[in-house]
Amino acid sequence: ITSIAAIGTLLILLHLLQSDLSETSTQERELRDGITGSQFELFYQPQHDGKGRLIGAEALVRWRHPERGLVAPGEFIPLAERTGLILPLGQSVLEQACRQLARWSREPGKAGWSLAVNVSALQMQQAGFVATVLGLIDYHGVVPGRLKLELTEGVLLQDFDQVSAKMHQLRSAGIAFALDDFGTGYSSLQYLRRLPLEQIKIDKSFVAELGRQDRDSAIVGTVLVLGRSLGLQVIAEGVENAEHWQLLSGLGCRLFQGYWFSVPMALPDFEAYAEAGRLPSDWAQPVPELPE
Ligand code: C2E
Ligand code: MG
Ligand code: MG
Ligand code: MG
């Protein structure tokens, strides 16, 4: 009887495993079809300086799914990374970003905007990554300094020397790098010293606790001081309200991104937002610039 029960359990487990596998491959196929079918689209979230000026955007990919509607990256990036589909997807994101930057460079008032693109570990490890990016900016005629690649600390854990070498090659061509979600991974001060970074992005989890957790204010303040002394820009992400903005400003932050300004928008909405030039209604007078 026990062995029959054991076999029964085993069969159930096998069945579960199989349906799980086939479900995964259905999702994978759908993702693959979505990529070849150009269903992935960039949304743009504005970034502002301390005077409220729009300085550019972060490109955040969305899946315009024929049945499910707009799907957020949290629902497909992990699968894309597990299956390697992040490579063609990331390529499409880079292509769209370069095309858009090139368009903006020909339009008055938009030529100075920068566009930040998230890059996955697998992309960075790809043998031809440097050539691909250089090829794209050359083909589209992008001013290299306008393209910013966002890496997380996880990317650096893969193969630090290889990633660092690629970053230096791209940096010599003028491309900028930002360290995303700073403070959430295995940050090492070595990274900040050895990598050709232009910017660090304070993770939104620290911003969320500002004014509630003294330690988070201390961390944010320290990151700002560190950035300044290393000649790095520091941008805060996840700025959701006037209080965040005020506390961050008081700590010396001069670059901001978050829902308080706007959620990520489809291109026409982003351009309309830029055109309107409106700031949040509770935007305060800018605090004086910090001495250089
Ligand atoms: P991330 O690069 O750290 O992007 C910031 C995320 O925070 C975005 O989520 C953005 O919509 C959200 N956010 C912005 N402002 C606020 C705010 O004030 N409050 C809160 N709570 N959240 C805010 P999203 O668009 O869902 O993207 C999630 C993550 O997916 C990104 O995190 C990034 O790691 C990844 N991702 C997005 N697009 C791409 C892509 O093209 N390639 C790759 N490899 N990853 C991407
Ligand atoms: Mg990012
Ligand atoms: Mg981030
Ligand atoms: Mg993130």
Image (spheres, rainbow, N blue to C red):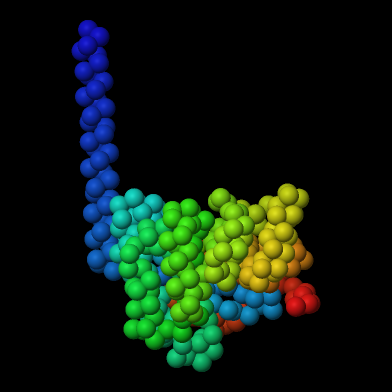
Query: At which x and y percent is residue 166?
Result: 43, 67
Residue at position x 22%, y 31% in the image: 15
Residue at position x 36%, y 68% in the image: 129
Residue at position x 22%, y 36% in the image: 18
Quadrant of the image containing the C terminus: bottom right
Task: Determine the image quadrant of residue 23.
Answer: top left
Q: Tell me how many marks there are.
A: 0
**In-image side of 263 versus 41 (left or right):** right
Query: At which x and y percent is residue 286?
Result: 75, 76
Q: Is residue 21 above or below residue 145?
A: above
Query: At which x and y percent is residue 48?
Result: 61, 74
Query: At which x and y percent is residue 275?
Result: 54, 84
Residue at position x 30%, y 52% in the image: 83
Q: Is residue 134 above or below residue 7?
A: below
Quadrant of the image containing the N terminus: top left
Q: Is residue 77 visible?
A: yes
**In-image side of 273 versus 90 (left or right):** right
Q: Is residue 272 above or below residue 209?
A: below
> In this view of the protein, which residue sits in the foreground, 156 or 161?
161
Q: Is residue 120 visible?
A: no
